[in-house]
Amino acid sequence: GCTSLRNIIVPKYLSQLSSNVFSRTGLVNVTIPNQITIIYDSAFAFCSELTNIIIPSSVREIGDCAFRSCRKLENVVILEGVRKIGESAFSDCSNLSNISLPNSIVQISRGAFRLCQKLVNFIVPAGVKTIEYGTFYGCSSLFNITIPGSVNEIEHRVFYDCTSLTNVIISEGVTSIDHDAFDLCPALDSIVIPNSITKISCRAFSSCASLKRIVVAED
């Protein structure tokens, strides 16, 4: 890669950022213009010096592994208009501590924030239908999570090995918690199950050593 490349202003006449276009460069600062509609797979993957990114409202989709292993990335702002975050889009961004997501997002794909070990708080946008496999796998600092009623299913291993997870709000409307969803969450000591839940699969709360209280909401 172009490891000495530090700054870039993407030209305004471009509408897409192609796969791997800036991967493995030394980029520190990137300005993405408001004409870009898609950031394709691995566009900024392994940019080890990138610290901040703003995704403009023109973008509709952030591709698979788009920012994977950007290990100095701390702050991400995604503006209203983005609808999909691809598989492993921000996985292994080990310093990511702040991310702002708009309610326009309807899909957060599997492993999107896997191993984001500095991420503490997360509010799932109100339009998301499914929290896919391993979305927060190994997010060891994740403390608070709010899951809106738009979500139908919390898929398997979504919060696997989230060792600091303590506060979980599952809103009325969620219907299914898949197997191993909260496996190895040793700090989780209580949880409220909304009345809308119709299925909790095997090992959903396995190895939650501090879990002492489960409240099942009444009609």
Image (tube, rainbow, N blue to C red):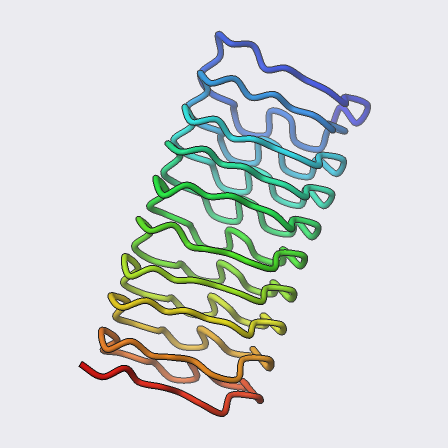
Which of the 4 image quarters holds residue 118?
bottom right
Residue 137 point in image, percent of width and height: 55, 64
The front one of 38 and 19 is 38
Question: Most extreme residue toward the top, as rendered?
Answer: 13
From the image, which quarter does the C terminus lie in? bottom left
Count of all numbered marks drawn on residues in the image: 0
**Horizontal arrangement in the rendering, residue 23 relative to residue 180 (left or right):** right
Q: Relative to 216, is 47 above or below?
A: above
From the image, which quarter does the N terminus lie in? top right
Question: Most extreme residue toward the right, as rendered?
Answer: 4
**Horizontal arrangement in the rendering, residue 129 relative to residue 160 (left or right):** left
**Horizontal arrangement in the rendering, residue 185 relative to residue 182 (left or right):** right
Q: Relative to 60, is 84 above or below?
A: below
Question: Most extreme residue toward the left, as rendered?
Answer: 219
Residue 202 point in image, percent of width and height: 38, 84
- Residue at 59 percent across and 15 percent down: it is 10
The front one of 150 and 38 is 150
- Residue at 35 percent across and 73 percent down: it is 177
Residue 14 point in image, percent of width and height: 49, 12
Residue 198 point in image, percent of width and height: 22, 78
Which of the 4 image quarters holds residue 35?
top left
Which of the 4 image quarters holds residue 42?
top right
- Residue at 52 percent across and 24 percent down: it is 18
